[in-house]
Image (cartoon, helix red, strand yellow):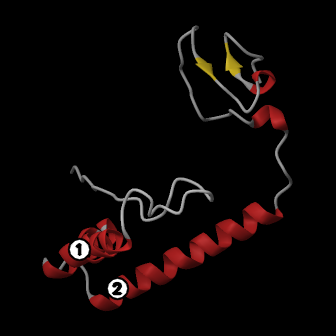
Amino acid sequence: VMMEMATYRYHGHSMSDPGITYRNREEVAQVRATRDPVDRVKKYCLDTELVTEAEIKEIDKEIKAEVVAAVEAAKSAPMPDPSELWTDIHVGQTKDFFMRGPDITTSSGVYGTVV
């Protein structure tokens, strides 16, 4: 089974990017109303009778509870050691791999300090 989800970023790239400099609010609203990948999968599953509306609601409820629990766990966990900054981000890289950090001392790979 292969599923492809064509997604769309509803918000800007960062706090300083409102996301409406290069597109208007109407475009975002139109995409949200017609192309939202989560809504499309829900509709497909309902239309093909893979699930019922009640099952969708239960799945949504379970997902929201899981996200809340994960956020609470993350907020209560101790801050990781700075040496963990790049852990599990890029694995199996070549010997010439380099990733620029906020400054050269936190970069990873051949040009910076391996953290």
Q: Nearer the viewer, mark 2 or mark 1?
A: 1
Instruction: Identify the residue at the far bottom of this view.
Output: 54
Disc 1 marks a residue whose amino acid type is: Thr
In the image, 7 versus 75, the foreground residue is 7
The spot of residue 61 in percent (x, y) is 49, 83
Residue at image mark 1: 34
Q: Secondary structure at mark 2?
A: helix
Name the mark on residue 74: none
- Residue at left 28%, top 69%? 31
Q: Is residue 76 above or below residue 112?
A: below
Examine the image and state in which quarter residue 76 appears.
Answer: bottom right
Residues at marks 2 and 1, CA–CA distance in whole angstroms: 22 Å
The spot of residue 43 in percent (x, y) is 22, 78
Disc 2 marks a residue whose amino acid type is: Glu
- Residue at left 45%, top 59%? 21
Quick one: quadrant of the C terminus?
top right
Q: Is residue 37 above or below residue 55?
A: above
Q: Secondary structure at mark 1?
A: helix
Residue at image mark 2: 55
Query: How busy is the neighbourhood of tag 2: few (under 14 within 10 Å), some, or many (20 plus)?
Result: few
Q: Is residue 51 above or below residue 114?
A: below
Instruction: Identify the residue at the far front of this view.
Output: 21
In the image, 40: left or right of 107?
Answer: left
The spot of residue 9 in percent (x, y) is 41, 59
Q: Is residue 23 above or below residue 38?
A: above
In the image, 95 versus 73, the foreground residue is 95
- Residue at left 32%, top 74%? 26
In the image, 92: left or right of 37?
Answer: right
The spot of residue 83 in percent (x, y) is 81, 32
Counting residues from the start of the chain, the first of labels 2 and 1 encountered is 1
